[in-house]
Amino acid sequence: NAGVMQNPRHLVRRRGQEARLRCSPMKGHSHVYWYRQLPEEGLKFMVYLQKENIIDESGMPKERFSAEFPKEGPSILRIQQVVRGDSAAYFCASSPPTGIEGYTFGSGTRLTVV
Amino acid sequence: GENVEQHPSTLSVQEGDSAVIKCTYSDSASNYFPWYKQELGKRPQLIIDIRSNVGEKKDQRIAVTLNKTAKHFSLHITETQPEDSAVYFCAADHYGNKLVFGAGTILRVKS
């Protein structure tokens, strides 16, 4: 069981570029969650998705950020026109369809905007 | 929505002493309360969890207690070791859909 896979591990983008972060849930998990962690801060919820559905996006900034979890392939967190304030670690977690127990995190993508 | 507060923000203990981290939550409908440990540059990892129908749970040197009436829960680490040094996060579920995290506690175990 490969666990929750995130890539890339590190991503450097210039201001104004787009960042695409990928997350493949654990085998058997159908729920995906994205969190942002600023340096020396906590885990802030961004969005919760199931296949082809956004269930809760209450933590997503209104502009430039979007997420999807297509029928085939990984979940994608997209940040358009990145700014320095977007620099952070972005963690993805997944859980099984049976419930929230077993919530497992990936290794994260560290985004640096230069 | 759910709000989770965590105290203290930093905690220094001598090796062998106990460490206690406390959290309060706002939503009385929350039923699941996990604790995660995050080492520098790594992913948060689940160390122990508790459901609302249980008051206490132990796993070797780690225990969690829950007071559902008062809406608070605590992590207890006994006989601390240097490898326990990390950031610890508490969390509470929001309608069984997602986890809302506390701000974290930096635990330093001095040898």
Image (cartoon, rainbow, N blue to C red):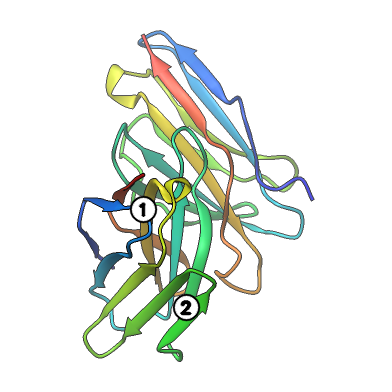
On-image quarter of the C terminus of chain B: top left
Name the amino acid type tagged 2.
Ile
In the displayed structure, A18 sits above or below B85; it is above
The image shows residue B64 at horizontal and vertical percentages of: 41, 75
- Mark 1: few, some, or many residues within 10 Å (few <14, many ≥20)? some
Quarter placement of the N terminus of chain B: bottom left
Which disc, if any, is residue B50? 2
The residue that appears at 70% across and 48% down in the rendered structure is A3
Indicate left or right for A71 with B37 as reference.
Answer: right
* Residue A90 relative to residue A6: left or right: left
Which is nearer the N-term, disc 1 or disc 2?
Answer: 1
User: Is any part of residue B104 visible from this angle?
Assistant: no
- Distance, label 1 to label 2, CA atoms, is 26 Å
Q: Position of residue A72 (x, y in %)?
A: 75, 44
Q: Dot 1 lies on which element?
A: loop
Q: Nearer the viewer, residue A63 or A102?
A: A102
Q: Chain of mark 2?
A: B
Of residues A10 and A54, which is closer to you in this image?
A10
Picture coordinates of residue B80, whole percent (x, y) = 40, 58
Q: Residue at x 63, y 51 (%)?
A: A52
Task: Name the residue carrying label 1.
Answer: B15
Three-letter amino acid code at disc 1? Glu
